[in-house]
Amino acid sequence: METKNVMIVGVGGQGSLLASKLLGRMLLEEGYDVKVSEVHGMSQRGGSVVTYVRYGDRVSSPIIDKGEADFIVSFELLEAARWMEYLKPGGQIVTSTQQIDPMPVVTGAAQYPEDLVAKMKAAGAKVDALDCLELAKQAGSSKAVNLVLMGRLSHYFGMDDAVWQKAIEASVPPKFLELNKKAFELGKNA
């Protein structure tokens, strides 16, 4: 199998590291060679962060270059748009519709761009956008956006649900397990 590339992007503190570990664990269980990068960016200061997950028969590097991502999974709309040049032709964006103002918007130096989903689609991207924050709240915690996104991403992988559930159980502390499983299901079924 050729190497597949997934970028997980967002703002620091949203749970992208757990999402990438869960995805990597699930793919390892399925027998793929997997490389997961470290988080890059100002993750502890609310800045932009990106994690790479690459999988296939043999993966030599954890880095994804521009135009190589099969999937961009985004916790926030502007981050999806910011990293779109990394998406390969025919690639898929799975994004939350949440908007978090970056510092230039907070200080009044810029405005948050309007109609980002329409703009990404107009640029040729396939975009699956949903209100992951609302679904996470329905599951019991606004911090479960990462599992909502993983549930939504599962549509595109065609793997048995039991494999995802096993990865969730291995990645999430027991006291948060049911909440996270519910968030995954809400994302999957949205």
Image (cartoon, grey):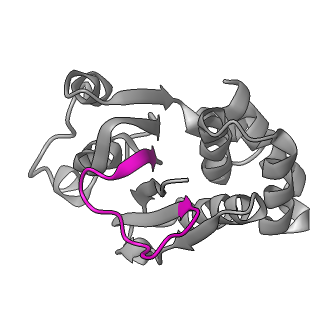
Residue 27 pos. (x, y %): 68, 59
Residue at image position (63%, 40%) is 157
Residue 59 pos. (x, y %): 50, 70
Task: Decide if residue 31 is in sight here.
Answer: yes
Region of the chain picked out in magenta, as a range = 55-73
Question: Foreground residue, 150 or 90?
Answer: 90
Q: Which quarter of the picture shows residue 131?
A: top right
Work out whether 22 lies above or below 133.
below
Residue at image position (46%, 38%) is 95
Question: Foreground residue, 131 or 17?
Answer: 17
Work out whether 56 lies above or below 147.
below
In the rendered image, the quadrant that contains the C terminus is: top right
Residue 45 pos. (x, y %): 38, 73
Work out whether 50 lies above or below 75.
below
Task: Decide if residue 179 is in sight here.
Answer: no
Question: Foreground residue, 136 or 170?
Answer: 170
Count of picture labels: 0
Residue 55 pos. (x, y %): 55, 61
Query: Viewed as shown, does residue 82 lie left or right of 137?
Result: left
Query: Viewed as shown, does residue 5 lie left or right of 120?
Result: right
Secondary structure predominantly adopted by residues drawn in magenta: loop
Residue at image position (40%, 64%) is 50
Residue at image position (66%, 63%) is 32
Residue 148: within the magenta? no
Q: Which quarter of the picture shows residue 66?
A: bottom left
Query: Viewed as shown, does residue 46 lie left or right of 188?
Result: left
